[in-house]
Image (cartoon, helix red, strand yellow):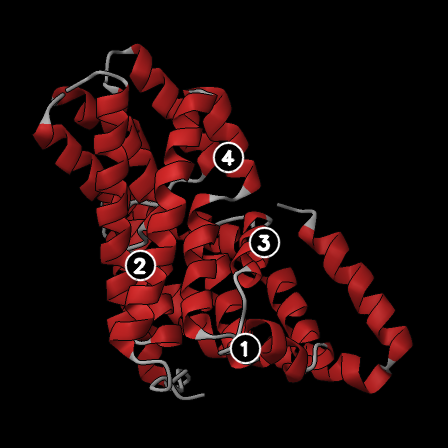
């Protein structure tokens, strides 16, 4: 994640040598864009803080382990859509769940909806693209995750 | 984008924060945990977002609107999808990083279907995420997911553009 800093700094320096005024303009724009979306990001943080209180990552395993059927898939899609877990935590967890006997299709529903659907980032998405587009994109994310889970289930012979 | 900077827009985060603070000082363990969570997510975002917005600022100043319109505007070719997929695969973090980037592309004249496509691609083909997935769940899993998700993301992008109306979103 940190490699963005050197890239941004190097480009800023190059930009500064090319044009001082344009570089200041870029920095001002960066601040303006950031500060105008900041409240939405803070709202996202509040939502995430509450969600991870209700569904801590450690409990994820128990929930997905409990039902290895359609209900389990729905739970996986629902939880994957609302929680926020970075990939470097989510995929090792998914591998452990697989070892514990959770079927591939439930893992697929969980891990894809985790990435495609962002309930907590909806305030940010709505601010940028409007309610309709944001909700449609997230619903289509749920549908795509469901289709991937079903395909995985068939291909791995779990249905 | 609508103006967000009225004090009212800080209402929800301010309420959640003061609730957690109040709970903590009334001796509830819940307050402590809520504060911890907020601190952690705030740290994640503040570590990642400043360089992202600097890059967006530089992009807005240096890249002429005409260049973007020519390649990603209403008369874009098939290749535009591919280039946006490539760009999306380099994203780190998640939607909270790709959303401001997508909006900048839109402001510079990228057609909405491509913007939604870019958002979708950023959720399915980020390179670090793909490596993690393939090594923990197997390459077969990753390939199946790509094969299904890529066309569906493009279809849904076309659909969302049609349903929301191309010219409707104003800058």
Q: Which mark is residue B130?
A: 4
- Badge 4 sits on which subunit? B
Dot 1 alpha-carbon crowd within 10 angstroms: few under 14, some 14 to 19, many 20 or more: some
Question: Picture coordinates of residue B7 (x, y %)?
Answer: 36, 84
Q: Are marks 4 and 1 in contact (CB under 8 Å)?
A: no
For the N terminus of chain B, the quadrant is bottom left
Q: Nearer the viewer, residue B77 or A151?
A: B77
Asked if marks 3 and 2 fall on the same chain, the answer is yes
Q: Which residue is mark 2?
A: B156
Residue B18 in sight here? no
Dot 2 alpha-carbon crowd within 10 angstroms: few under 14, some 14 to 19, many 20 or more: many
Q: Secondary structure at mark 1?
A: helix
> Image point 31% across, 56% down: which residue?
A120
Reading the chain from its start, which is encountered first: label 3 or label 2?
A: 3
Q: Nearer the viewer, residue A134 or A40?
A: A134
- Badge 3 sits on which subunit? B
């Amino acid at each position: 994640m940190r490699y963005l800093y050197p890239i941004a700094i190097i480009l800023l320096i190059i930009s500064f040598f090319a044009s001082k005024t344009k570089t200041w303009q870029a920095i001002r724009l960066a601040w303006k864009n950031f500060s105008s979306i900041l409240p939405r990001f803070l709202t996202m943080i509040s939502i995430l803080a509450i969600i991870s209180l209700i569904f801590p990552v450690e409990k994820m395993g128990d929930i997905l382990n409990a039902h290895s059927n359609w209900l389990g898939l729905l739970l996986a899609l629902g939880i994957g859509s609302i929680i926020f877990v970075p990939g470097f935590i989510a995929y090792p967890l998914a591998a452990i769940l697989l070892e514990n006997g959770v079927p591939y299709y439930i893992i697929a529903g969980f891990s894809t909806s985790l990435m495609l659907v962002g309930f907590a980032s909806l305030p940010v998405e709505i601010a940028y693209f409007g309610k309709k587009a944001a909700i449609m994109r997230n619903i289509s994310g749920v549908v795509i995750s469901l289709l991937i889970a079903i395909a995985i289930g068939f291909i791995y012979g779990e249905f | 984008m609508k103006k967000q900077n009225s004090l009212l827009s800080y209402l929800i985060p301010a309420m959640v924060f003061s609730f957690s603070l109040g709970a903590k000082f009334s001796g509830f363990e819940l307050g402590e945990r809520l504060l911890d969570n907020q601190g952690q997510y705030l740290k994640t975002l503040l570590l990642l977002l400043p360089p992202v917005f600097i890059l967006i600022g530089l992009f807005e100043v240096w890249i002429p609107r005409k260049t973007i319109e020519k390649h990603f505007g209403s008369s874009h070719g098939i290749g535009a999808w591919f280039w946006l997929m490539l760009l999306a695969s380099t994203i780190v973090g998640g939607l909270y990083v790709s959303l401001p980037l997508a909006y900048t592309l839109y402001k510079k004249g990228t057609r909405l279907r491509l913007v939604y496509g870019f958002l979708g691609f950023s959720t399915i083909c980020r390179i670090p995420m793909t490596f993690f997935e393939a090594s923990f769940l197997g390459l077969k899993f990753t390939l199946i997911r790509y094969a299904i998700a890529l066309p569906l993301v493009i279809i849904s992008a076309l659909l969302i553009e049609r349903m929301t109306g191309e010219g409707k979103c104003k800058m």
